[in-house]
Amino acid sequence: MAQSVPHVVVVGAGFAGLEVVKGLKRAPARVTLVDQHNHHTFQPLLYQVAGAQLDAGEVAHQVRAVLRRQANARFLQGTVTAVDWTRKTVRVADPTDPDAAHDLAFDELVVAPGAIYADFGVPGVREHAHFLKSLSEAVNLRSELLRRFETAAAAEARGEAPDPGTLTFAIIGGGPTGVEMAGALAELAHGVLPGDYPDLDLARVRIVLLEMGDALLPPFAPGSQRHARRVLERRGVEVRTGTAVAEVRRDAVVLAGGEVLPAHTTIWAAGVEAHPLAKALGIETTRGGRLVVEDDLTLPGTDGGWAAGDVAATRDDGGRLHPQVAPVAIQHGQHVARAIRAKYAGRPTPAFQYVDKGMMAIIGRNAGVAELSRRLGGLHLRGFVGWLGWLFIHLVYLPGHRNRLGAFVTWAYAYLTRDRHARLITAMEPSPSERTSRTGRLVTQAISAPRSGPEGGPADGPDGARPGGTSRAA
Ligand SMILES: Cc1cc2nc3c(=O)[nH]c(=O)nc-3n(C[C@H](O)[C@H](O)[C@H](O)COP(=O)(O)OP(=O)(O)OC[C@H]3O[C@@H](n4cnc5c(N)ncnc54)[C@H](O)[C@@H]3O)c2cc1C
């Protein structure tokens, strides 16, 4: 490959990073995509892995397969731990041995490592709650959920009195992830597992969805919020809005009022913050850790730095931060590729403009909500039509023909039989960087600061990271 063309390094093979790479397919550039995993994870369907609806392989796609037909792109598995803006290099740690690292030189660097869950300082969350961000977390959560039923069955077989916490599942955060997880778990517990555990009284199962705000699905219209609540309650989920969590323990959740809810399994779905790599770059960030970018998505004060996806703080015309959702990340990625092409063609780089198409969430079988943006007619769809719309959009965006076909067949089979074929208790090792970012330890650093970073403290205004969940775009 010719060395005279610019070298574009993209950190993160998520929604944003993949779009940058694809958008540079015909550009006179060498592209290196670096990710800690060898796969892209389709996070919107992780809850289906946790709920035993889909196999892990159906929501992930190997990056090398995506790049196979792109002659100017290469993949490197590794964790980016530092950026040197003066030498224009990134430090890439070996995927299995964090002590083995090398420096990779770049002309353009696109930072797109996504987000991590924010614990908002609630004690015990990092130690005892389950998250739903990576494939390993989804597989481990599925195992944890199924293991609780085995534990209850074993206690029953021994003739012991049931422990109320064993089959109580607390889900914290009533945004789309919390709602989707609660709906999936209710279907699993009440629709599928009674056949597997004929001797277990599954009326004991408690699924408690805790939301600090007044309503579920905060960014949606009140009609959609009420619909979500009605459907979940009809399916056996206890919805408690206006309920803040003070502490998560190994076997209980302590509510702000002092009530102790015995629950051996707690799922934290209460909001995200930008990946710690963003804060370590020496560039101004928002309260939620997102990088403050120029309007063309370049990083201020850097030579060749860009940000895209959940780590980039772009705003709408009213000054509100765009939500940390896949469509924003995709459009960021497409924009950065366009802007890099323009830069090397000697044209001015354009300003980023987000085209909002709306948002959607699924509640469970035959029930979903979809709200199209005003630009698309402002239509609100609920129930079966909302559910169908959600399935269609997710099938279209799921990367890989094999994955789309697999998910379609699995969904059709599950719809007809109510079966959940992935009811396996297995475990997956999280990657070293996942482990460290979960404990909140800083795993990244800027070796040298950008040339002339802007002054000032944290950015104003609310960030996308808030207790209660993130909003979703269609
Ligand atoms: C459970 C869940 C459900 C969701 N549901 C929806 C939904 O229904 N609709 C919707 O629009 N959005 C949804 N979202 C949000 C959406 O997934 C994100 O907005 C989107 O993934 C952001 O894209 P990204 O490219 O910025 O980051 P990601 O897609 O998170 O990709 C980041 C990539 O960077 C890699 N990486 C991280 N750190 C490093 C490092 N140091 N070195 C190398 N690689 C690194 C990661 O491995 C990952 O592959 C959901 C999110 C979650 C967690």
Image (spheres, rainbow, N blue to C red):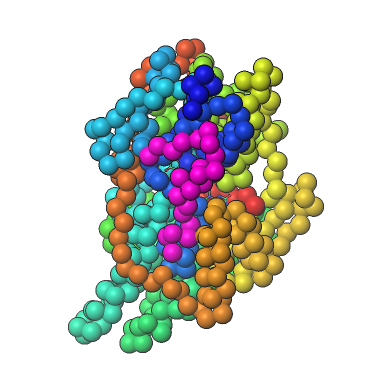
User: Residue 333's x, y, as percent?
Assistant: 58, 36
Q: Residue furthest top?
A: 452
What residue do we see at 46% from left, 36% from top? Answer: 74
- The residue lying at 28 percent from left, 80 percent from top is 153
Q: Is-magenta flag for residue 280? A: no
- Residue at the far left: name it: 158
Question: Where on the picture, by quarter, is residue 224?
Answer: bottom right
Q: Residue 198: give x, y in percent of width and height.
A: 36, 87
Relative to 231, does residue 9 appear above or below in the rendering?
above
Considering depth in this image, is 182 or 349 the residue closer to the camera? 349
Q: From what the image shows, is residue 457 above or below residue 243?
A: above
The answer to which quarter of the image holds residue 220 is: bottom right
Residue at 42 percent across and 60 percent down: it is 56
Q: Percent from the top left, x then y, of residue 239?
A: 50, 65
Q: Is residue 366 visible?
A: yes
Towards the viewer: 72 or 84: 72
* Whether residue 117 is visible: no
In-image side of 34 versus 296 (left or right): left
Between 219 and 21, which is closer to the camera in this rendering? 21
Residue stretch rendered in magenta on the structure: 55-77
Q: Residue at x 43, y 68 (%)?
A: 52
